[in-house]
Image (cartoon, rainbow, N blue to C red):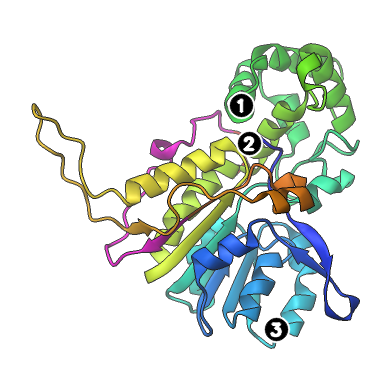
Amino acid sequence: MTAGRAEGHETEGAGGLVRHVPVLLDGVLSALSVRPGEVVVDGTFGAGGYSRAFLEAGARVIGVDRDPDAIAGGQALVEASNGALTLVPGRFADIETHLASLGVEAVDGVVLDLGVSSMQLDEADRGFSFMRDGPLDMRMEQAGPSAADVVNTLPARDLTRIIGLLGEEKRAGQVARAIEQRSKEQPFTRTGDLAALIEKVVGRSPKKMHIHPATRTFQALRIYVNGELHQAASVLGAAEKVLRPGGRLVVVSFHSLEDRIVKKFFADRTRTRGGGSRHMPEEDVPPATFELVVKGGQEPDESETQANPRARSARLRAGRRTGAPARDLDIHAIGVPHLAEFKGLGG
């Protein structure tokens, strides 16, 4: 499990320009099979690495990102695209609404690079990283309740469930109780302060000295603050609705929780037969809405992980839309856990 999305690495292109190379780019382009004139949604625009490649292939690209910094940083690419790139600030789960506002009824491709970006992790002021002391924030949209609000407000029982489920931290109860007790005495405001407390509770494993004890708790808080699993599941259902027959959905995930959701979604949407047994008749199964483009999860090769170690845990899954009607989606049935509600959070 990793802290989040790997944004890729930098290479020097023509004219000395630094170009951003996102994770599994070749695999994404192969699965998407974009053709000139097609309309593609890049649901996680980030540094624009995927979008740039789609533009070079002749596509019209609609880039979506909930981070204002990503939208601002992409304006140069918008200007260079001669109208082929449109950037939309907002959540990717709302792509139906975003496309309707642009007068677009259906698209040929949707690409998603799930999780937090390296740009966000590398900026201490964003508060995502326990390695760089900064405000305890973690908000992708830079609005709404922060991670500090969560740890200083929620009771230990709710924090235990969040840290245990979203961080898969074995000592979630101990961490949650320590957080609750300390926050009553002095509220948390800095990432370094919270990370130090967690390290005292969890300790460092002699076998895993390279893994910081706060890794899992910070991941859990980030996912909860941003409603990441809720958003990831919801966008799969939204993509099913906006893709035209033959359109492709390509998803790159970076930890087991997200990948499990994507895998369950495709398993459900490509299923053509019910369970059944000799004692029970087969259940009726709705027509499949996708057919797999990539069997199983595609992983980066050794050369890519050497160039970008953060890509190690990446998994790519992809499907091609059939002509069957889209279905309603129960996000909890594909792995989104039920968690305590916290006003203002996205999941």
Residue 258 in magenta stretch: no
Q: Position of residue 138 (x, y in %)?
A: 76, 42
Q: Is residue 157 left or right of residue 16?
A: left
| Residue 68 on image: x %, y % | 75, 60
Q: Earlier in the sequence, mark 3 or mark 1?
A: 3
Among the 4 quarters of the image, the one containing residue 151 = top right
Q: Are marks 3 and 2 in contact (CB under 8 Å)?
A: no
Three-letter residue code for mark 1: Ile
Vertical placement of residue 176 versus 210, above or below:
above
**Can you say which quadrant of the picture contains the N terminus?**
top right
Q: Secondary structure at mark 1?
A: helix
Q: CA distance from mark 3 to mark 2?
A: 35 Å
Which residue is identified by label 3? Answer: 81
The residue pinned by badge 1 equals: 162
C-alpha separation, residue under disc 3 versus residue under disc 1: 42 Å
Segment tinted magenta in the rendering: 318-341
Give x and y (percent) for residue 242: 42, 67
Q: Amino acid at mark 3?
A: Ser
C-beta proximity under 8 Å, tags 2 and 1: yes
Relative placement, left or right, of 281 versus 234 is left
